[in-house]
Image (cartoon, rainbow, N blue to C red):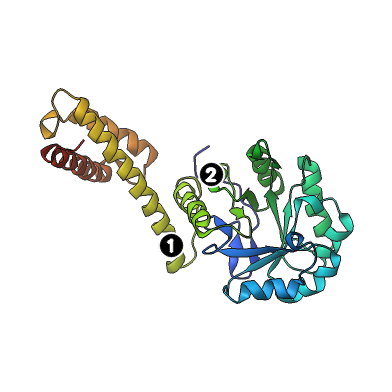
């Protein structure tokens, strides 16, 4: 299976954000694609309307809300763009049914130790209430000793078996963002109070890894340009890394620079790249790679002339 192979699955729209097609979404703090509010964090002492209004004061995009109890649902229905069923509430079937009946998109976090079948069954409860707009969210388990342990294989299995979009709850730490995207996550969830720095790190992982692993079929010029921008971002990272590695080779070779070019190796490189990029083929790839290689050689010679490693 190629890196861009993917299962056709449903997409869920939350306000202006669509999860399941297009780029990987990041939901969390400042700068994210959507924000969310957990009323559980307030232990039910803050009305849903007030919690949403506090976020609306600084954010005009989609807002998701995790209820503390069924009493929060009328205000959530009137003010939010989606509902989060927290991991601890996943098996509160009465709450699940009440949430589904709101008609808003529903994010179902996997409860601690819940099996794949138990997790997917919650989506079926929502469907039974007439709401098929369900997104699954792998939340893993957290302890003060091990931190967060995510089951990305289970997340991938949930996506493949259900055909539904999937999120991964990263908590406050975006360190696993790249792994989550590589495993097939449609979105990344950070805690409501996550910093702008954490959001940026998650977005970078989503942009770079997603460009390599995720197929997109944009339907407009604007969307297509956005997809190209993400591919170009990944290209920039890879080109920078290639230049650094090429510089290492130049320092290790007995004859470096342009004089030490191995044209046979370069032809083999282009032929191998053409196998992965048959649409471009060797004829189009050859001048591209020649420019990349020469840029690296020029950089290595400039560094050597300036006494830089």
Front position in the image: 266 or 113: 113
Could you say whether the residue bearing mark 1 is in a helix, strand or loop?
helix
Task: Give the residue drawn at x 43%, y 62%.
Answer: 226
Q: CA distance from mark 1 to mark 2?
A: 24 Å
Front position in the image: 169 or 93: 169
Q: Position of residue 220 (x, y in %)?
A: 46, 68
Front position in the image: 277 or 172: 172
Q: Position of residue 110 (x, y in %)?
A: 74, 47
Task: Give the residue drawn at x 26%, y 46%.
Answer: 284
- Residue 25 left/right relative to 303: right
Residue assigned mark 2: 175
* Camera-side mark, 1 or 2: 2
Q: Is residue 76 above or below residue 198?
A: below
Kindly identify which numbered label has been placed on residue 16.
Answer: none
- Toward the right, the furthest residue is 94
Q: Is residue 184 above or below residue 63?
A: above
Residue assigned mark 1: 226
- Residue 225 left/right relative to 22: left
Earlier-in-chain disc, 1 versus 2:
2
| Residue 5 visible within the image | no
- Residue 124 left/right relative to 155: right
For the residue carrying disc 2, how many other residues have a C-alpha within 10 Å: few (<14), some (14-19), or many (20+)? few
């Amino acid at each position: 299976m190629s890196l861009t192979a993917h299962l056709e699955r449903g997409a869920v729209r939350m306000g202006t954000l669509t999860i399941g097609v297009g780029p990987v979404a990041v939901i969390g703090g400042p700068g994210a694609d959507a924000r969310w509010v957990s009323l559980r964090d307030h232990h039910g002492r803050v009305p849903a309307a007030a919690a949403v209004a506090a976020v609306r004061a600084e954010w005009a995009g989609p807002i998701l809300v995790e209820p503390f109890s069924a009493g929060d649902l009328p205000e959530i229905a009137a003010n939010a763009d989606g509902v989060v069923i927290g991991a601890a509430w996943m098996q509160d079937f009465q709450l699940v049914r009440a949430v589904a009946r709101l008609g808003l998109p529903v994010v179902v976090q996997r409860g601690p130790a819940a099996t794949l079948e138990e997790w997917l069954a919650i989506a079926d409860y929502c469907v039974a209430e007439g709401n098929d707009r369900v997104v699954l969210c792998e939340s893993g388990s957290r302890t003060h000793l091990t931190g967060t342990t995510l089951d990305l294989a289970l997340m991938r299995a949930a996506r493949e078996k259900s055909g539904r979009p999937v999120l991964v709850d990263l908590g406050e730490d975006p360190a696993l963002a790249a792994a989550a995207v590589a495993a097939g996550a449609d979105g990344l969830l950070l805690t409501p109070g996550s910093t702008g720095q954490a959001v940026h790190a998650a977005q970078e992982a989503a942009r770079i890894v997603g460009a390599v692993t995720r197929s997109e079929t944009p339907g407009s010029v604007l969307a297509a340009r956005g997809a190209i921008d993400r591919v170009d971002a990944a290209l920039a990272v890879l080109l920078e890394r290639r230049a650094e590695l090429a510089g290492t080779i130049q320092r290790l070779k007995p004859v470096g620079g342009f004089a030490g070019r191995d044209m046979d190796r370069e032809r083999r490189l282009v032929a191998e790249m053409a196998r992965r990029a048959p649409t471009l083929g060797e004829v189009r790839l050859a001048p591209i790679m020649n420019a990349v290689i020469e840029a690296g050689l020029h950089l290595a010679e400039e560094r050597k002339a300036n006494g830089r490693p």
